[in-house]
């Protein structure tokens, strides 16, 4: 009942996520329409640049949210790092899968794809959010095929097919797609923040909201999915036996850690040192799992994995809980789970492993046959002590002023080491070598021990260069030398130890080497798989501690920038065009034109005479007072008229 309630709440949350995305799209579209309408309004004086910037800034987030919804609504496409297995290519594997599907009561998968992970899973390309049935696919990790016994591999396959029989794929697909959609939406916001400074200003709130939303969704779906894993374990126990299922769970967890260590400790160092990879890394991993020196460490690891707690985001319960549930299951009838320990291994053709290896190690370096790569790995691990030995020899010779006549500068030879031992400089040489070795090599208890081991490795490298000896792989330590016939493996180590510890024994070592055909003054040839350009590996390289950006993240950020720039330029150009072609507003006093028709003529355009404005000054109603002027009588000042001035008649 509780599980059903959680499932209903998870569906409600997923529907709410869809509704939230729809509201965001509608609001963004409304702002877009508002910007274009405002640009074409007659009253607009300038284009709405603020609204355009807001729409361009929100465009990456809106598109990212829509893309997240599309990812959750449609079936996932096959992964690029997988290889499809046909029925004709692996008939034994297909027959086993179909047999187990019949045993658990479900139809077999439609496709089988190999992966490079220590895991197995099933998917169903169901439509309508996983409610309608679709094509089934079984994903099987090739490291499981290489490392699990047939009985435990059958238990793993029965567990995955048990999800189909219990119809877990309906809710499981919904929960997986919902989580993937929420994570994709949050990733879209992060990419937009990295690509646009304006988005970075307000992206904190949406990212926090989506983070909380994802946590709640996982909190609701995690118990349901973990309960489904327990039910699938029960189906597998009914077919393969509870003990076999428990062993398979322990072995799978141990193989997962062994695969990680194989990639980190063996594959990656070889790729950096020689720029080469094996053509079939899974065959090399099978050699590691089957190595006698690793049986006890792997057995101890299988017992320790049950003590690890479960990851909070992992839909699988912790291993201790699953093992406890398996112990409490009833004993099934023997016919329900026939013993498959004598069954043949479920191997696949090597071409599938080679194709998957190329997909796993693409652009990683030159591909070598896996046997040659394994021999190169043994040589590399065996001769690692030669680099610090050469540096120690150069340091002591420089400090003591010892010449090197007859040898090339910088070339490490047996003669240079023996001459330092003859001159009484064994302790300075040992101290210089121990300072270059990592701690824990035993130099504290025996200062001369690492020097004797390095000298033995140098002699072995000369024998290997003459093709009279070879190195064998030791997964727990350096490679082991297989000397020429008639010489025990520990004999050369004894010769080197005697020459290092006892004065005057270097001449006897020289006689032994001469009997084996080794020239003391001959430098070592370059390692196999290297070229002349590999000497550049010793040159100093620039190292940056800044976190790098992966290729997919760089492509997402570039696409986000292109999207924001496209929306910005497109809206700017469209809004400017609408603003430039808008209708001019009508002002008061503007003359109105009309069309008139003269008698006997066509229509003619005659503008109406515009009234001429007149301006009159108002008559003032206030009169300035007339100032009183003084009266002056000027009559007395004028001369009196006389007769002489009278006119003549």
Image (cartoon, helix red, strand yellow):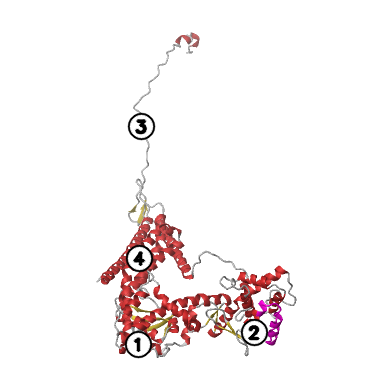
What residue is pinned by disc 2?
463
Query: Whole-Å distance between the Cαs marked 2 and 3?
Result: 127 Å
Verify whether residue 473 appears in magenta. no
Residue 410: give x, y in percent of width and height.
69, 74
Q: Nearer the viewer, residue 478 or 227?
A: 478
Q: Nearer the viewer, residue 569 or 630?
A: 569
What's drawn in magenta, residue-wise? Answer: 498-520
Residue 205: give x, y in percent of width and height.
38, 59
Category of crowding for the residue at label 4, using alpha-carbon neighbours closer than 10 angstroms: few (below 14), some (14–19), many (at least 20): some
Secondary structure, mark 2, is helix
Q: Which residue is depicted at the point 63% across and 80% down?
A: 456
Secondary structure, mark 1, is helix
Q: Is residue 230 above or below residue 351?
A: above
Verify whether residue 507 appears in magenta. yes
Which of the two discs, 2 and 3, labels the residue nearer the N terminus? 2
Query: Whole-Å distance between the Cαs marked 1 and 2?
Result: 54 Å
Q: Is residue 138 visible?
A: no
Query: Whole-Å distance between the Cαs marked 4 and 3?
Result: 83 Å
Residue 544: give x, y in percent of width and height.
55, 65
What residue is pinned by disc 3?
618
Q: Nearer the viewer, mark 2 or mark 3?
A: 2
């Amino acid at each position: 009942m509780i599980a059903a309630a959680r499932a209903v709440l998870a569906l409600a949350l997923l529907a709410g996520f869809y509704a939230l995305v729809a509201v965001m799209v509608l609001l963004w579209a409304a702002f877009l329409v508002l910007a274009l309408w405002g640009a074409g309004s007659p009253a607009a004086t300038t284009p709405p640049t603020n609204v355009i910037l807001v729409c361009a800034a929100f465009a990456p987030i809106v598109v990212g949210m829509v893309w997240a919804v599309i990812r959750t609504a449609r079936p996932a496409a096959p992964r690029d790092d997988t290889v499809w297995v046909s029925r004709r290519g692996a008939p034994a594997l297909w027959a086993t899968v179909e047999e187990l599907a019949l045993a658990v009561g479900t139809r077999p998968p439609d496709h089988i794809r190999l992966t490079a992970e220590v895991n197995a899973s099933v998917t169903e390309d169901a439509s309508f959010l996983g409610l309608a049935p679709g094509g089934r696919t079984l994903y099987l990790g090739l490291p499981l095929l290489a490392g699990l016994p047939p009985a435990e591999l059958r238990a793993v396959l029965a567990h995955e097919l048990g999800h189909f029989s219990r119809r877990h794929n309906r809710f499981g697909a919904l929960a997986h797609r919902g989580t993937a959609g929420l994570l994709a939406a949050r990733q879209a916001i992060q990419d937009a923040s990295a690509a646009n400074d304006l988005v970075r200003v307000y992206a904190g709130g949406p990212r926090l909201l989506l983070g909380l939303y994802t946590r709640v969704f996982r909190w609701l779906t995690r118990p349901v999915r973990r309960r489904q894993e327990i039910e699938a374990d029960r189906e597998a126990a009914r077919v393969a036996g509870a003990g076999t299922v428990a062993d398979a769970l322990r072995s799978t967890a141990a193989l997962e850690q062994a695969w990680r260590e194989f990639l980190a400790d063996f594959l990656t160092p070889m790729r950096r040192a020689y720029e080469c990879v094996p053509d079939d890394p899974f065959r090399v991993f099978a050699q590691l799992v089957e190595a006698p020196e690793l049986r006890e460490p792997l057995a101890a690891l299988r017992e320790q994995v049950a003590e690890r707690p479960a990851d909070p985001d992992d839909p699988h319960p912790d291993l201790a809980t699953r093992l406890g549930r398996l112990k409490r299951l009833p004993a099934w009838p023997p016919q329900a789970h026939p013993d498959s320990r004598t069954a043949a291994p479920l191997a696949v053709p090597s071409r599938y492993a080679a194709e998957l290896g190329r997909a796993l190690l693409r652009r990683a370096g030159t591909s070598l046959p896996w046997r040659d790569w394994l021999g190169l790995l043994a040589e590399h691990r065996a001769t690692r002590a030669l680099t610090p030995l050469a540096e120690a020899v150069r340091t002591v010779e420089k400090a003591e002023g010892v010449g090197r006549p007859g040898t090339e500068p910088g070339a490490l030879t047996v003669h240079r080491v023996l001459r330092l031992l003859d001159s009484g400089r064994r302790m300075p040489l040992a101290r210089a070598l121990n300072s270059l070795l990592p701690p824990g090599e035993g130099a504290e208890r025996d200062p001369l021990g690492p020097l004797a081991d390095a000298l033995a490795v140098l002699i072995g490298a000369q024998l290997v260069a003459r093709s009279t000896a070879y190195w064998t792989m030791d997964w727990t330590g350096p490679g082991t030398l297989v000397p020429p016939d008639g010489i025990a493996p520990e004999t050369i180590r004894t010769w080197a130890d005697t020459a290092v510890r006892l004065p005057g024994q270097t001449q006897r070592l020289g006689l032994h080497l001469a009997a084996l055909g080794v020239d003391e003054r001959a430098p070592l040839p370059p390692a196999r798989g290297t070229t002349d350009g590999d000497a550049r590996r010793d040159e100093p390289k620039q190292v940056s501690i800044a976190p790098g950006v992966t290729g997919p993240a760089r492509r997402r950020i570039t696409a986000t920038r292109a999207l924001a720039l496209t929306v910005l330029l497109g809206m700017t150009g469209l809004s400017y065009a609408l603003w430039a072609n808008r209708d001019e507003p009508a002002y008061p006093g503007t003359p109105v034109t009309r069309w008139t028709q003269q008698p006997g003529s066509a229509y003619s355009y005659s503008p109406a005479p515009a009234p001429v404005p007149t301006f009159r000054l108002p008559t003032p109603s206030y009169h300035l007072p007339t100032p009183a002027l003084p009266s002056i009588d000027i009559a007395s000042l004028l001369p009196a008229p006389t007769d002489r001035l009278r006119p003549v008649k």
